[in-house]
Amino acid sequence: MQNVRIGVDTGGTFTDVVAVDEQTGEIVTTKTPSTPANPADGFITGIGKLGELIRSAGARDERASAAMPTRSEAGATMDMVSSIVHGTTVATNQLLEDRIANLGFITTEGFEFILEIARQSVPEGYGNSYFWVKPPRIVPVHLVRTVGGRLDHLGEEVRPFSTEQAVEVARWFRARGITAIGVCFLHSYANPEHERRMRDVLAAEHPEAVVSLSSDVLREYREYERSVTTLVDAAVKPTMRRYIANLSGRLGMPFSVMKSNGGVLSAREVVNQPISTVLSGPAAGALGAALIASTAGHGSVITLDGGGTSTDVAVVVDGEPSLTTEGSVGRYPCKIPMIDIVTVGAGGGSIASISPEGTLKVGPRSAGADPGPLCYGRGGTEVTVTDAHLFLGRIPPHLLGGEIPLDAGAARAGIEALAGKLGLSPERTATGILEISAFNQSNAIRQLTVKRGLDVRDFPLVTFGGSGPLLACRLIDILGLPAVLVPRQPGNVSAFGLLTVDVKNDYVRTHVTRELALDTAARILGELEAEAAEALDREGFDEPVFARSADLRYYGQAYEVRVPAPAGPVDEEWLAEVTGRFHDAHEKLYGYGYRDDPRHAVEWVNLRVSGIGPITRPAIHRFTPAREGEPSSRTVHFEEAVPTPIHQRDTLKPGTVIEGPAVIEEYGSTTPLHPGFTATVDDYGNLEIRHG
């Protein structure tokens, strides 16, 4: 292989690696267990394992042929690697696990309680409780300090910045060993001058501190969201810098990191904006699945990425995943552009337990990669979804083509013990575990469809990840899906998605007005495009592509609708086009609009620019089986235990139709086909599952 590009996606249970030859389109894939204590270890192990596969030549063994449907017979070395793209969960895990320490907050004098005031929204289920107490703030009030100075909403200085107070605050944090600091001054989205002066003071008085400015992280109004987003960036910045430095030193070559917005950025740049990586891996999966689905003729789909720890769901409309700036990670709102993803604790490692009410419960706790399910034999003590699949015979007695043997006896003993406590048969207990897991996944899908006015029955589902295809048939029944598409090598779709991603940076400027001055809009968009061009130039792109958008609302509304804005001159025609798109989008989202009603003026809120450095995406070729073979058989329990054909995925030709009950196995995943369902192999090797 020549000019090899590599994608590495670090998940909670497995690290997935994909290499593509840019000249021939040949693909090599592999997986290795993740190393939660230091994710870089799994990354380096995966790269080494991939190098061995690339260098190997001659006859394919069973594992290698399953791992790579096409491969070069010529020898190759890692010296041929032209680029590496990484999807990481380092920042995500730190936030989910609430590992926030040594974090301070500097804000405008008089606004020290902005984090306590927050928003009045409460979590679902509050109505079933007598009291709801706000969770702890990301920075407790005793670690908040204020500095004098004030700007108005237009960025004009009302009171001068107090250098004396700034020096005092910097020394106060230094004396207490607070080394990560977020700075958010009132209206700094309109004028960042005071924040930049605070950064200069911190550099002089507290040089070891890592500092995040809200005007760099999120130049957009709404003080609470901007404050928390800035503090999240400051909180994860030290961890990400250590991780990137460690990985860069061990890897010995530059690499890029996947961002939540569906783009990538070089590692040297991403350490300055680590918050942009909080949904790194799931975003890559949605993009990879979108490309696979569109190639197979499905422009609009739901994507479901089932891993060992969680399941991530996204909606793709006309080939593009939906974006949002209203996302969150754990309990922290992150108002940055990100692919709209709902995550639930419903993966292969999700733990089955008995609730205080005495009923069966599955997730969100997970056994993860360490110790893993009971059947891993690594010290796990609780039954998981994977144990239930193994007990029912729906997965083979090994993972990764035999690399990880599974202990069926341990799974059986655990399920029998749990069944005894529930007063159910082991088969009913295992089936119940899978049924609850399927409903957990279906609820995540409903959050992205029904709650957004979309009919789930209009969307095929693309399911991938190691555990993604395991519940495909049940999801068709529960949700009334028209079909489920299972790509080839579903366990590596997220890593493949990393190789389909452009370099992308997002820039925003708040400008609230009901009478948008064309010269002002042109100036702001020009400044944002200049920032984007400068960043892309550092990435090596001298011909960037700019995508404009705007956030608008009807005067009096609290939240906005984002619509694309055309390129070209900002004139009356441009203004009318954007306004018309807003009316259309509002009516589509909410069922009404005020296009011809002068009583409801349109208000402009934010202008946005995405700077894109386009790459050449890998081609998805039509599929030719690597070998021939006949199905084997084993006993599998669906409605009852019956002898069931076991098909090897890499032997199935396009046009093959398999009727359930059956099980289709491959290197990184398994697809159980329930009675009454059929699976058809399309021209690209995807399985299309439908109710018979």
Image: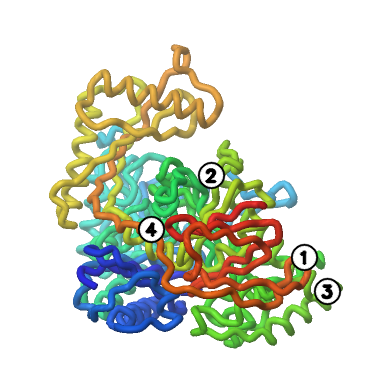
Asked which quadrant contains residue 136, the reply is bottom right
Residue ranking furthest to the right: 423
Residue closer to the observer: 617 or 578:
617
Q: Residue at x 38, y 59 (%)?
A: 497
Amino acid type, label 3: Ser
* Of callouts 4 and 2, the N-terminal one: 2
Helix, strand or loop under label 4: loop
Which-is-in-front pick, marks 4 and 3?
4
Amino acid type, label 1: Glu
Q: Which mark is residue 622?
A: 4
* Of callouts 4 and 3, the N-terminal one: 3
Helix, strand or loop under label 3: loop
Asked which quadrant contains residue 347, the reply is bottom right
**Gap between marks 3 and 2 measured at Cα:** 48 Å
Query: Are circles 4 and 2 on residues that touch, CB within 8 Å?
Result: no
* Of callouts 1 and 3, the N-terminal one: 3
Crowding at mark 4 (Cα within 10 Å: few <14, some 14-19, many 20+): few
Residue 375, horizontal then vertical, whole percent: 63, 83
Which-is-in-front pick, marks 3 and 2?
3
* Of callouts 3 and 2, the N-terminal one: 2
Which-is-in-front pick, marks 2 and 1?
1
Does residue 481 appear in this view?
yes
Q: Is residue 682 left or right of residue 664?
A: left
For label 1, the residue is 639
Does residue 207 appear in this view?
no
For label 3, the residue is 425
Amino acid type, label 4: Arg
Colour option used: rainbow
Amino acid type, label 2: Arg
For label 2, the residue is 119
Which-is-in-front pick, marks 4 and 2?
4
